[in-house]
Amino acid sequence: MVFWKNMDEKIKKMTVMDIGLVKWSVFFFTIIIVKLFPQLLRINYAILVMLMLACGARPLYKIWIKKFK
């Protein structure tokens, strides 16, 4: 748990610009992966939507729904 607490402290120092740059780097990394493995493009869209919702549920809940203490 010390690792995660340490990471939380480091992430708190990031600005909106830093987070945006991380998003872009992940986007370009994904393009590289798809270029290397084009069979990934044949995944059903319903599965991709379910994965997107599953991955986005917790962050969206924490940002928009959860009450701050």
Image (spheres, grey):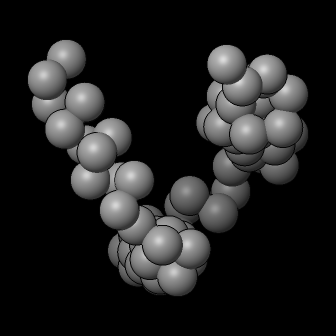
Residue 52: x %, y % from top left: 72, 43
Look at the image and tell me in which quarter the C terminus lies. Answer: top right
Residue 19 visible? The answer is yes
Q: Which of 7 and 22 is in front in this view?
A: 7
Residue at image position (36%, 54%) is 11
Q: Which of 60 and 52 is in front in this view?
A: 60
How many badges with numbers are in the image?
A: 0
Residue at image position (15%, 31%) is 3
- Horizontal side, residue 15 vs residue 36: left or right: right
Residue 33, quarter of the rendered image: bottom left
Look at the image and tell me in which quarter the N terminus lies. Answer: top left
Residue 39: x %, y % from top left: 54, 61
Residue at image position (79%, 22%) is 67
34 vs 39: above or below: below
Residue 56: x %, y % from top left: 70, 39
Residue 24 visible? The answer is no
Residue most extreme to the front: 69
Residue at image position (48%, 72%) is 15
28 vs 46: above or below: below
